[in-house]
Image (cartoon, grey):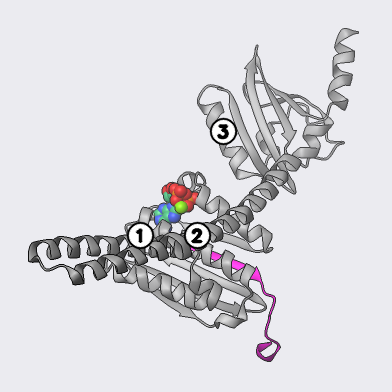
Amino acid sequence: MQTDSKIDILQHIPVGFIRTDHNCKILKINPKAKTYLSIDENDSLQGQRLTDYIDNMQVLNRLYSFVKNGWKNISIQDIKIEDKFLNIEGRVIGDSYIINITDNTITSQALDRATQSLLIGQENEKRRISREIHDGIGQAISTVRLHLDFLNSKIETNELKADISRISHMISDIASDLRSLSHDLMPSTLVDFGLITAVTTLIRRVNQSQSIYVHFENDLSDKDIEYNYALNIYRIIQELINNSIKHAECKEIKIRLKIIDKLIVLEVSDDGKGSSKSEKSNGIGLYNIKNRLASLNGELKITTAKHKGFKALIKIPFIRLKPDTQP
Ligand SMILES: Nc1ncnc2c1ncn2[C@@H]1O[C@H](COP(=O)(O)OP(=O)(O)O)[C@@H](O)[C@H]1O
Ligand SMILES: [Mg+2]
């Protein structure tokens, strides 16, 4: 009777439960697990292999690999099946294998929303610090330099004059570093002119380094895109260019920005060393890009492989601002 009551519990718990033997044959599966894996509830599955019922390649590959490696523990977090984010965990108990599946959708979505709010907060803070540096410290240091130059004009000893002039140059370098820092935090060109001018300025700065060449193909004008879109697209382009510089060892980066069928289409690609699937899923940069896109209902598709370059294709539903340029 004790066994019966245990079975009853499994029928009702809000956790997927699967017990298999070491050949992956299902010994027991509860209704929740069937729902999570989109298996018909009337299918008894008794004696069938679990792997026959899983069409998510990532889960399937992990299952195969741990069967092959002698049944070690598995843990797959936040895997997306249909419209749910699932956590799948398994471990050996006695002569069978127990798999639990929990639905993490609400936590995952809440995390994405929290990240989006965090990104907005960070942008506000960046704008504040950028203004502080530009208008506060930046101005102050320029004034110091002016005073120093004035002082220098009064000095007659040549040796002292040369020393002060050297200090003045050092201050000028600091002022220029501060300007760059302020610009990285929040490009004034983006605020004052718009996306295209800001991206063009960013690209010019990269091309000045003369180690990587960035091409820019563009159909849009500054006024086409409102600030919130412009800021997010600018940050995405900035991250993708930085990634190519940091990770790709490439010679060229191509950026295309177009409007196709009421979508903003952005393509950023490089001719570098590419990336494997596992490498590219670890970073925070690409995760932030996805979150920025989620807030604009946009999507990201990455095409890359070892030695095959890296391409990010982004599509964002387009809200046209200027009626006179309506397609
Ligand atoms: N253009 C690229 N070429 C090669 N690998 C890349 C490229 N962009 C991203 N990657 C890979 O994807 C990973 C994740 O990128 P990202 O999320 O931006 O994180 P981070 O730049 O902080 O490492 C990188 O660590 C790198 O392995
Ligand atoms: Mg990055």
Q: Is residue 104 visible?
A: yes
- Location of the C terminus by quadrant is bottom right
Direction from residue 139 to residue 165 in the image, left or right: left
Q: Callout 2: few (<14), some (14-19), or many (20+) C-alpha neighbours within 10 Å?
A: some
| Residue topped by disc 2 | 132
Labels 1 and 2 touching (C-beta < 8 A): no
Magenta segment boundaries in residue numbering: 311-326
| Residue topped by disc 3 | 64
Q: Amino acid at mark 1?
A: Gly
Q: Which is more N-terminal, label 2 or label 3? A: 3
What residue sits 63% from the left and 68% below the top?
Answer: 228
Judged from the image, the secondary structure of the residue bearing numbered disc 3 is helix
* Mark 1 within 8 Å of ligand 1, using the beta carbon: yes
Q: CA distance from mark 3 to mark 1?
A: 32 Å
Q: Nearer the viewer, residue 320 or 18?
A: 320
| Residue topped by disc 1 | 272
Direction from residue 214 to residue 288 in the image, left or right: right
Instruction: Judge whether residue 238 is colored magenta.
Output: no
